Amino acid sequence: MKPTLLILAAGMASRYGSMKQIDGFGPNGETIIDYSIYDAIKAGFGKVVFIIKEEFLDNFKGIFEPKLAGKIETDYVFQNFDLKQFGIEEEIYREKPWGTAHAILSGRNLIKEPFCVINADDYYGFDAFKKMVDFLETEATDSLFSIVGYQIGKTLSDFGSVSRGVCKTSDAGFLEEITERTQVYKKGESIVYEENGSEYPLDYDTPVSMNFWGFTPAVFKLTEDLFKTFAIENKDKPKAEFFIPLIGENLVKNNTASFKVIPTDSQWFGVTYKEDKPFVQNSIDQLVKNKTYPENLWN
């Protein structure tokens, strides 16, 4: 059974100002998701599942169904506020759902095969998808998952500092911990992160998480148990979010599962603010010019 691609696309994109998940960046209005799905099909994924808000459904179907028909199976699941589905009877007020790890639980009744999770608004490159398929088809077990490790030097912005989850790995290449560095930036020819007013160097090829994870369906039960605890403990913190790295940290810490860090030297780029759009458009134009992608992606 071919692996499934699970795309996190339920965010409201408040900093961007509109639905960046379906904004056009390619020469014919292609979204970033289009390029991810194109690479995923080429790599060997058999299905794509969109995690969205229910009110997004018609937009997503209108954009993706015509171009993907006959190329890859598609499905949709909804991220919502219903806690009773997890056995939590207490009413907990939220203005937005609980984060990326909560989002993947939306697929727990649909996905029965190994799968990977990506962001809708990040460009990852074919190499990562191919390596992930190979892992999911030949190595993944219910106690061995994975994360793609990008070289930090290929994930930085020319427009200011960024936050990155820096991965500490064992000699054998397995994840030991992820440390969130909130002020990472270029300084001349070097890369540094700032903490408590001091700067610390980072090697160009330091692996970082860009939210590209590989799992088997066993992760759903593990995540659901963690989420129940998280939701109750944070019921009075309306902005607390249950992120995927929290799953990794907990499973590694408790020796429940290991995560292989899959290295890639692909260039990553993403979009957070409207000011990022010209840079992303130019990056995609260059990929089209060097024949990484055809000008008309789906024709």
Image (cartoon, rainbow, N blue to C red):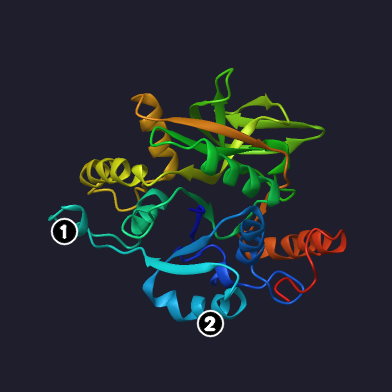
Across and down, in percent, residue 191 comes to: 72, 32
Above or below 260: residue 101: below
**The residue tagged with tag 1: helix, strand or loop?**
loop
**Closer to the camera in the image, 60 or 68:** 68
In the picture provided, is 28 more to the left or to the right than 212? right
> Pointer 2: what residue?
62
Q: Which residue occupies the extreme top position in the image?
A: 171
Question: Disc count in the image?
Answer: 2
Quadrant in the rendering for residue 64: bottom right
Residue nearest the observer in this picture, 101 or 129? 129
Q: Secondary structure at mark 2?
A: helix
Q: Residue at x 68, y 44 (%)?
A: 155
Choose the circle earlier in sequence order: 2 or 1: 2
Horizontal arrangement in the rendering, residue 151 relative to residue 252 (left or right): right
Confirm whether residue 20 shows in the render: yes
Q: Is residue 137 above or below residue 275?
A: above
Judged left or right of residue 155, residue 230 is left
Front position in the image: 296 or 21? 296
Q: Nearer the viewer, mark 2 or mark 1?
A: 2
Q: Can you give x and y, in whole percent of width and height, for residue 284 in the image? A: 76, 62
Reading the image, the residue beneath label 1 is: 91
